[in-house]
Amino acid sequence: MAVLTSNAIFRTARCIVPAGVAALFAVGLCACSFDLGSFSLSDKEAAPKPQATPTAEISADNVSDAQGLAAQGQVLARSGKSAEAQAAFAKALAIDPYNLQALYGRGLVYQGEKQHAEAIADFSAAHGLSPQRADPLVARATSYLALDKVKEAAIDLDEAVQAEPNNAQAWSTRGLAYERLGDKAKAAASYSRAIAIRPRDDAARHGLARVGG
């Protein structure tokens, strides 16, 4: 199979976690935010089986069409048009099921609609195609936290901070996961690392204050 290129620089939107004990029982969901960039996949044969089936053999034109639809989906999602965004992402994935931009974007929209099982499936596919990126793991962990699957979230976030040690959102969300698990030492260390990277991270600052850091 020829090497295909898909545009996908992932940015997980900032999660606003309320101060106080209530933050231990609920996760503020990330708002959808997208940045476009280039990302190259060089080993599609090793990628997991996609969830969607392509409508035709994937060609350079197919990839270009899918990228255009994914970008359209991003614009629609930013405008709050979730249904239209989902339709654009679905079309993109029908053409090119390896389109990371569409998988991640659709996952964020699902997450915003509190359809966490669907979001987790898309983030899992995105992670399988880009294991070196932290953002799909952080996004999946956010949905796990919303479903009270805190141990699963912590596993994802451990992997995320190893993949991208300077990802402030990964450290901040990891702090929340370990706070909810009752591990104040790991929570404090994670929040502190997030603040060191992003000094104005209010969620991390509130979290560090809660765990006594």
Image (cartoon, rainbow, N blue to C red):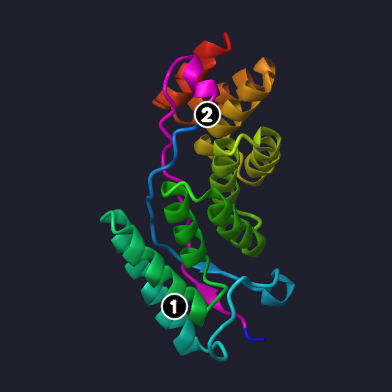
**Residue at image coords 67%, 75%:** 44
**Residue at image coords 50%, 74%:** 93
Task: Give the residues in magenta.
Answer: 3-25
Q: Quadrant of residue 164?
A: top right
Asked if the residue at tag 1 contacts the one at tag 2, i.e. Cβ–Cβ closer than 8 Å, the answer is no
Q: How far apart in space, not on screen, are marks 2 and 1 (Cα)?
A: 35 Å
Percent across and percent down for residue 97 are 56, 75
Q: Which residue is mark 1?
A: 66
Q: Is residue 32 left or right of residue 179?
A: left
**Residue at image coords 46%, 19%:** 205
Query: Seen from this angle, which residue lies furthest right?
Result: 46
Percent across and percent down for residue 16 are 40, 31
- Which secondary structure class fits the magenta region best? loop
Q: Quadrant of residue 81?
A: bottom left
**Per the image, is 7 magenta?**
yes
Q: Tell me the kind of residue under disc 1.
A: Ala
Closest to the observer, 27 or 164: 27
**Quadrant of the rendering where the N terminus is positioned:** bottom right
**Quadrant of the rendering where the C terminus is positioned:** top right
Foreground mark, 2 or 1, reads: 1
Compared to 196, does 52 lie above or below?
below
Of the residues under marks 2 and 1, which one precedes in the sequence? 1
Compared to 119, does 30 lie above or below?
above
Q: Is residue 156 left or right of residue 102?
A: right
Q: Which residue is mark 2?
A: 194
Q: Tell me the kind of residue under disc 2.
A: Ala
**Per the image, is 164 magenta?**
no
